[in-house]
Image (spheres, coloured by chain):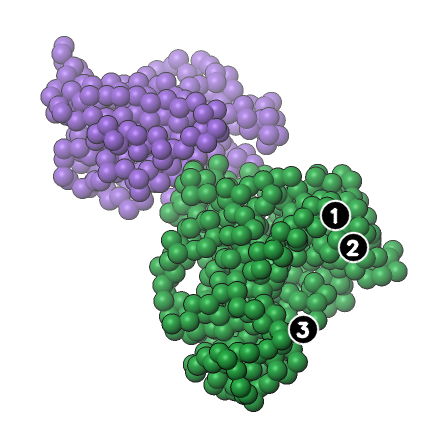
Amino acid sequence: MRHLLDFQGWTRPEVENLLDTARVMAEVLERPVKKVPALQGFTVATVFFEPSTRTRISFELAARRMSADVVSFAAQASSLQKGESYKDTLLTLEAMGIDAYIIRADSAGVPHQATRWVKGVVVNGGDGRRAHPTQALLDAYTLLEALGTLEGKKIAIVGDILHSRVARSNVELLPLLGAEVWVAGPPTLLPQTLPGARLTPHLEEALAEADAVMVLRLQKERMEAGLIHLQDYIAHYQVTEERLRKAKPNAPLLHPGPMNRDIELEGTLADSERSLVNRQVRNGQAVRMAVLYHLLVGKER
Amino acid sequence: MLLIQNVKLVDALGERGPVDVLIGEGRILSLNGGKAETVMDGRGLYLVPGFVDLHAHLREPGQEVKEELSTGLLAAVRGGYTDIVSMPNTTPPVDTPEAVRALRKKAQALGLARLHPAAALTQGQEGKTLTEIGLLQEAKAALLTDDGHTNEDAGILAAGLLQASAFGLPVAVHAEDASLRRGGVMNDGPLADLLGLPGNPPEAEAARIARDLEVLRYALRRSPKRPHLHIQHLSTRRGLELLREAKRAGLPVTAEATPHHLTLTQESLRSFDPLFKVAPPLRTPEDVEALIEGLLDGTLDAIATDHAPHTQAEKEMDLLRAPFGIPSLEVAFPLLYTELHLKRGFPLRRLVELFTDGPRRILGHKPLHLEEGAEASLVLLDPRERPVDPKAFASKARFSPWAGWVLGGWPVLTLVEGRVVHQALE
């Protein structure tokens, strides 16, 4: 693969190959010395036009554990408003000899645009509502750990689907691995269509017989924009113990974080054994190591 | 005296010729030849009346980094335009008679295309207080519009239509319900959902057109003179249907379509390239078909460019922050000559009418036909094809969604009242 922007055009063997590499990387992370020389001599830049601590640290650790040099650029939204362009920033980094760019932006398509400007490989670290492919890969990895296979499994994604890059990437990726994906949320927060997913405004319909449930963060901005009343959301869309009884017994729970406890998810569930949130974070590193390895070294795609 | 020999004529009346056109004293002196100092071979070329653009952003005053009168009006004559209506959303907005006069004076000195400044309908384009409409008409403002600002207050629009009717000025509207549009940057629908881009629904246009037509009905009932509502850059099938019904009912409404809404669709946004970010957004192929149908059956009155130059850097920002707009003065006619006439058989006579008499009627100007005694504001068109090269644009905005498209119908000679303002004859 040349870049990782989203999963449009990907095949199942390509995804499985990448996840196989992630398994090898997970073993590296179990060792006392969590470092291999695979990316020695490569320079990786995290270019975050939108703030995010968790994802940036995860990527930077992934690169360092493979001995890459890492630089980090964090833009203030204000300096962008002053006219400093994404393109200029990237061209400056390009002049410094960067091999891989991990780009995060609040506007969909910035990583796609970046591929027109730089020679290095581009990893989408989350762009607007569009995609967050490494999050989807780590979700898939975590689901495979828990369920063994995704073939024929029903995965429910719950919450603000319309504005969620995590949901979009999962809806592209999980069906590639054989899963049936349902998305549920209030009609104001659902897209018109989402190829690969079944849409419903009824949480119970999505949860019924679900093999796993992914809960999304409800952004405060949506309530401020008047798209949903918080109490109405909690009353009808919060994932609770009682509602989860509709799903398969012990169906695991995922959440991309950061979590609003007792809003999208009942607080006690977040800490229960069903919650795979910490596994997700851990697997994120392994998956990102695999992505960087494939982009910079591997020629599999 | 200028003699163009063996040239075919096309205007709203139809196609004829070849004839030998003698031009002098700013007029067409003869269609049967004569003696002249300059003789041109017009074989294989078309002579048409000068184009009129109802909707160009020339950015002066205040945003000369994007465009200024000298570059915008040069781009205009290179595109075959002899008359240009400039939009008032400059910095500051053109909302006083003095500002209109200053623009006209400066444009006259340039001696390129004739400038007809549009003035703001409300002071500062803020939608609160009407401008000095009578005085603006005396200063020769072409029409009144708050343009990109969408006239949220129906009462002010009604008052504007009433006041403008007394002075015979059209009121042009950017018909888009801002509250339904919200932050939309592309056409709302499954593709916007897939690309994760905020959608601007076609219903935002239709809803505002429906409201504005009711406001027009009110003004029509209240005013002793007929008000004139002009809808800018219509982009949707539903908007067109509403317009068609209104025209059938006899409402005094006209409308324009742009070259980009006639040749591009939302599919372009798959590239995430802000070059394709326009307001209203590029729509679906069904909308494009409806617009072409509307041009043919007379529902749409004119093709207007909405020439909207920006700096290269602005158009290389991300899709949320990049400004809306495409520069198109220099390619509008060749684009539609090729894509509509050559490829789809759209009648050339009607296409020329949409660039000439259509906009002239909206401005209250007399039709211009190619006959003896007519004003010699004319364009010579070369059907030979060549690719679009934005680097050669006279406009400061040297980028184009049509870069590399191979087009025919290029203006090779533009005359304003007999004066040569553009010549690119080989």
- What's the residue type where badge 1 is placed? Pro
Look at the numbered discs 2 and 3 and tell me whether their residues touch, using CB distance below 8 Å: no
**Which secondary structure lies at badge 1?**
helix
Look at the numbered discs 2 and 1 and tell me whether their residues touch, using CB distance below 8 Å: yes
**Which secondary structure lies at badge 3?**
loop
Q: On the image, which quarter does residue A61 sit in?
A: top left
Q: On the image, which quarter does residue B11 sit in?
A: bottom right
Marks 2/1: CA distance?
8 Å
Q: Is residue A194 above or below residue A295?
A: below
Chain for colour purple: A
In the image, taking residue B257 as reference, residue A29 lies left or right, namely: left
Q: Position of residue A179 (x, y in %)?
A: 32, 38
Would you call the spot at circle 3 few (<14 residues within 10 Å), some (14-19), or many (20 or more)?
some
Indicate which label's residue lies in the foreground, 2 or 3.
2
**Which secondary structure lies at badge 2?**
helix
- What's the residue type where badge 2 is placed? Glu
Q: Chain of mark 3?
A: B
Q: Is residue B39 above or below residue B78?
A: below
Instruction: Pick whichever, A173 or A89, lies toward us.
Output: A89
Q: Which residue is mark 1?
A: B97
State the hue of chain B: green
